[in-house]
Image: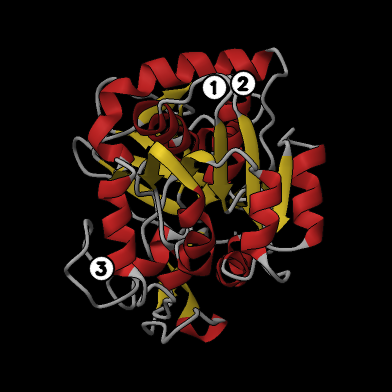
Amino acid sequence: MTTILNRQVHLVRRPQGAPVPGDFRIVDRPVPVPGEGELLLRNLYLSLDPYMRGRMNDSHGSYAPPYALDAPPGGGTVARVVRSRLDGFAEGDLVVAPDGGWQSFALSDGTGLRRLPNDMAQPSQALGVLGMTGFTAWWGLTAIGRPQAGETLVVSAAGGAVGSVAGQIGRLLGCRVVGIAGGAGKCRQVVEDLGFDACLDHRAPDLAGRLGEAAPDGIDIYFENVGGAVREAVWPRLNTDARVPVCGLVSGYNGVTEDAGGIHALLLSLIVKRIRLQGFLNADHLDSFPDFERQMRGWLDTGQLHAPETIVDGLDQAAAAFVGLFEGHNTGKLVVRLSD
């Protein structure tokens, strides 16, 4: 008989700059046995997200502790309950586990699990447009951005998991939406498939000049995912009373940032233009999740909102897919589909 093992991807070295495949190693371990009050989960889909890069550093100054070496990084998963020793859960239940991790099987005491319909047609969406990335886009834009019909919204990393949703929500709420993404092909997808009014390639020359043409009346909301040179191009065009939800600063996640200069001018403009600049964590606002899910499901069911995904098959490909995340290889939500 074939012995079933728990395949894991271990973080074996803290990345220096951009992550590389050698920072990870495939390891096979015995399948864990659930104790009293625990569940054994079989992971079906694994979420890969830019924030994971920060947790790979040996730094304790962030909002989450660093990942341990020689162990699988954490990460959200869609999973089936294989064995239950916890009241309220049964074998076969489909759930979202907030920290199922880069592995085939995981133990859970039920904390943070979110139930899904057992026959959900596209379970991976529970990690993307109907999960934490979609919630991040919805809450950041609606609670901090406060979009009004006729306003101009600019979204950086517009082809990514959060940006692609934030821009579509802005469009549904009546904004003119300008995306910024890497590469002409990705910009074309953002306009043609997601309905943005325009999308600018940040790799092409004179981003600031092209932004002025795409947003001639200035920018009322800037959904910040990137920072660096993109932020520097956007900031001078912010209107009085502009709002800036700060979701991420991916340009600096690998230890290289272009944000060293211009900070005094930036802070001064907060005063002069009465700009609202606010960072946020979706985990602080989970009481709003039912409202988010209800509105997003409505838009999805009516075809008003699209949910692009990049699905990579096999846990063995997780490290390469994560490396590609910082090279712009994905469109929309990046998910690993674990093979049986």
The span from disc 2 to disc 3 (Cα, nearest Å) is: 37 Å
Q: Is residue 229 above or below residue 142?
A: below
The span from disc 1 to disc 3 (Cα, nearest Å) is: 33 Å
Q: Which numbered marker is on residue 172?
A: 2
**Residue type pointed to by label 2:** Leu
Within-10-Å neighbours for mark 2: few <14, some 14–19, many 20+:
some
Within-10-Å neighbours for mark 3: few <14, some 14–19, many 20+:
some
Within-10-Å neighbours for mark 1: few <14, some 14–19, many 20+:
few
Q: Secondary structure at mark 2?
A: helix
Q: Nearer the viewer, residue 229 or 339?
A: 229
Q: Nearer the viewer, mark 2 or mark 3?
A: 2
**Residue type pointed to by label 1:** Asn
Q: Secondary structure at mark 1?
A: loop
**Toward which corner of the image does residue 32 lie, by quadrant?**
bottom left
Of pointers 2 and 3, the one earlier in the residue sequence: 3
Q: Which residue is mark 3?
A: 66
Q: Which numbered marker is on residue 118?
A: 1
Q: Is residue 123 left or right of residue 240?
A: right
Q: Is residue 217 left or right of residue 91?
A: right
Q: Nearer the viewer, mark 1 or mark 3?
A: 3
Q: Position of residue 217 (x, y in %)?
A: 60, 38
Of pointers 1 and 2, the one earlier in the residue sequence: 1
The number of callouts visible is 3
Q: Is residue 323 above or below residue 158?
A: below
Q: Nearer the viewer, residue 141 or 81?
A: 141
Q: Position of residue 214 (x, y in %)?
A: 69, 46
**Residue type pointed to by label 3:** Pro
